[in-house]
Image (cartoon, coloured by chain):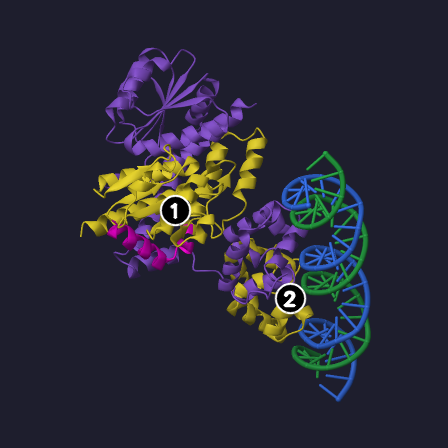
Chain colours: A yellow, B purple, C blue, D green
Amino acid sequence: MEDRAPASIKQFEERLIDVSESLPKRLRQCADYVAANKDRIAVSTVAEMAEGAGVQPSAFMRFCRILGFSGFSEMQRLFREFYAGGWPDYSTRLKHLREKAEGSASALLGEFVDAGRASLENLLKTIDAKTLDDAVDTLAKAQMIHIIGLRRSFPVASYISYAFEKMNVPAMLHSGVGGLDNHNAIRTGDVLLAVTFSPYSAETVDMVEAVSARGIPVVALTDTIVSPLRKFETITLSVSEVDFGAFRSLSATLCLAIVLSVAVGTKRSE
Amino acid sequence: MEDRAPASIKQFEERLIDVSESLPKRLRQCADYVAANKDRIAVSTVAEMAEGAGVQPSAFMRFCRILGFSGFSEMQRLFREFYAGGWPDYSTRLKHLREKAEGSASALLGEFVDAGRASLENLLKTIDAKTLDDAVDTLAKAQMIHIIGLRRSFPVASYISYAFEKMNVPAMLHSGVGGLDNHNAIRTGDVLLAVTFSPYSAETVDMVEAVSARGIPVVALTDTIVSPLRKFETITLSVSEVDFGAFRSLSATLCLAIVLSVAVGTKRSE
DNA sequence: TCAGAAATGGACTATAAATTCCATTTTTTA
DNA sequence: TAAAAAATGGAATTTATAGTCCATTTCTGA
């Protein structure tokens, strides 16, 4: 019925208000239930929604069409997309962009900016305040902070190292060139800050293992919870970021790195 | 397979960590993807999840069973039940954080996330497509790309260097330890990519000056237009970033760096 | 109160998704 | 390095769910 389907949650709400005045009993029930349970649409079946509203599935279907959708599925799609919010497969999108030579540099920029923004938003959602505080406390108490991060994590490690230096926090960047030698530099009272992402470099994991076995606290900056560092007793801050081939858009990771640095620096100078 | 299905998200995560160690390739991909996209499970089909993880639907099914579920549907049910119904969105959360968590590490995180997003938005506005294309063209034509970036710019330089290496672009990172010596490594046909920000390190500026005098093209990644590099004939990409004391949230800078790397890498392989 | 129109409930069908099965490939082990 | 075991991909099957249709009920207005 009527014109075209709402293309956003906002349009959907407007439509709902418009229509709900002039609705017969059962359809009115649908409108009320939906208004009060918008979030359930994405994860329910028509049968469930209908039951919730106290109507027959067919009545609910009719309701969807009155709102302008072709059926329940179309309406659900709107909500699913919205809630999946800004986390589409950027890496696939970027790959396509790159393959189709039309991938002008500016188009690429647009995608990466978008991906970066999504990563940052996501960071805010996923970082647990308690864990972050723990990490800051632990690092602030350290006599010396040892930083390790190789390959793709090296920029992050070097950044943290620079920041610590500027804030007069005693820190040491392990470049890993010497292999296991500098394990000895790590002593009781120190803390290790390890940064590692998906093809987790063996050196970093080894170092965490060795150090952790000696009872020295480890703070880890890594992706997801399945990282191999989970095996050890570490305070783990996980950042999920868009990976693109060998690269990762480090927006969220560096943001967390700077926060960690500043927080630790501030705490120590108190 | 194995005991009973996880009854809560927590149990699910534990289970995921447990098994993910000993998983063959494809199933490992599933684990990684799921760990990074837990919120997607409730609103996706197996096919979608499988595609995201880069595996066949049947492989994803197997993965669900390993986790202890009878199939995907059961796993999905868990997530649908606990589906919080759209977490508060970014701006709400940010406001909340600012008001409540004042002075804590989480509050800092909020500030930096916000700063990062602003920087990214700004980047999109200020970067000139033409200049960007020029930069990419110039770098793509280079026989060898020399990269310099010291102190606070070093993470960016090292990141670009890593990215180029991964894309088989001949590049060389000048760490600056040897002083002016390696100027000689730069030859006709090469290009210099210089990264420098506000207290512009003298070594970088000197190098640009020397190299530029020899008629070798220079691409510069710097802040604002008053950068001392402006004096020379360089293709300048300027990024304004929110500074915080001695630090800069490198979100926008690194975003531009990755775009440059990918664009150059792609162009060269054509 | 009765005719006509609108709304409703529920059975039926089509469709899309989950799940299973098995031939082929890869990895492990003797 | 050959045999056995495990893992994988893809087609075939089953199941669940959306969507349709129509007989019955409930409203509306003369």
Please name the residue shown 38% across and 16% down the image: B217
Q: Residue A117 carries which label?
A: none
Give the distance between the C-alpha atoms of the residues marked 2 and 1, in whole angstroms.
Answer: 55 Å
Does dot 1 land on a helix, a strand or a loop? helix
Residue A2 visible within the image: no
Q: Which residue in the protein does label 2 denote?
A: A46
Residue B246 on the magenta segment: no
Q: Which residue in the protein does label 1 denote?
A: A210
* Highlighted range, magenta: A123-142
Give the quarter of the image for residue A251.
top left
Q: Do circles 2 and 1 both sit on a common chain?
A: yes
Please name the residue shown 44% across and 52% down the image: A230
Q: What amino acid is found at the position of numbered circle 2 in the picture?
A: Val
Q: What amino acid is found at the position of numbered circle 1 in the picture?
A: Ala
Categorize mark 1 by other alpha carbons within 10 Å: few (<14), some (14-19), many (20+): some
Q: Magenta region's main secondary structure? A: helix
Residue A129 on the magenta segment: yes
Sequence order check: which comes first, mark 2 or mark 1?
2
